[in-house]
Amino acid sequence: MPAIFWTLLVAAATAVVTAPATGLFVTPRMEARKKRVGEVHASRDTFSASMTRIISACAEQAAAPGGRRAGLDSRHA
C-alpha cells in the first residue's frame, strides 16, 4: 500500500513541475509559430487571388473576337 502512495506522490510532483515548464518553454514557441503560419496563409491567399485574376484575364482574352482561339491555336502560332 505505501508503494501506491509513493507512486501517486511522484506522479503529482511531476505534474506540478511539468505544467509551468510547459508554459514557459512551449507556449511562446507555439505563439511565434502561429504568427509565422498566419503570414504564410496570408501570402498564399494573396498569390491565389492574383493567379485567379490572371487566369480570368487570359480566359477573357482567349474568348474575345480576335483572341488566340479565333484562328490559330497556340501550338500553331
Image (cartoon, grey):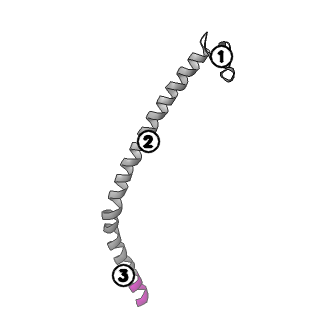
Residue drawn at point x = 47 percent, y = 29 percent:
50
The residue identified by callout 1 is 69
Mark 1 crowdedness (10 Å alpha carbons): few <14, some 14-19, many ≥20: few
Q: Quadrant of residue 2?
A: bottom left
Q: Tell me which amino acid carries mark 2.
A: His
Task: Identify the mark nearer the N-term, 1 or 2.
Answer: 2
Whether residue 74 sits left or right of residue 3 in the image: it is: right
Q: Tell me which amino acid carries mark 1.
A: Arg
Secondary structure beneath label 3: helix
Q: Nearer the viewer, residue 57 or 74?
A: 74
Mark 2 crowdedness (10 Å alpha carbons): few <14, some 14-19, many ≥20: few
Numbered disc in front, either 1 or 3: 1
Secondary structure beneath label 1: helix
Whether residue 61 sits left or right of residue 43 in the image: it is: right
The residue identified by callout 3 is 9
The residue identified by callout 2 is 41
Task: Identify the mark nearer the N-term, 1 or 3.
Answer: 3
Provide the residue span drawn in magenta. Answer: 1-7
Whether residue 67 sits left or right of residue 48 in the image: it is: right
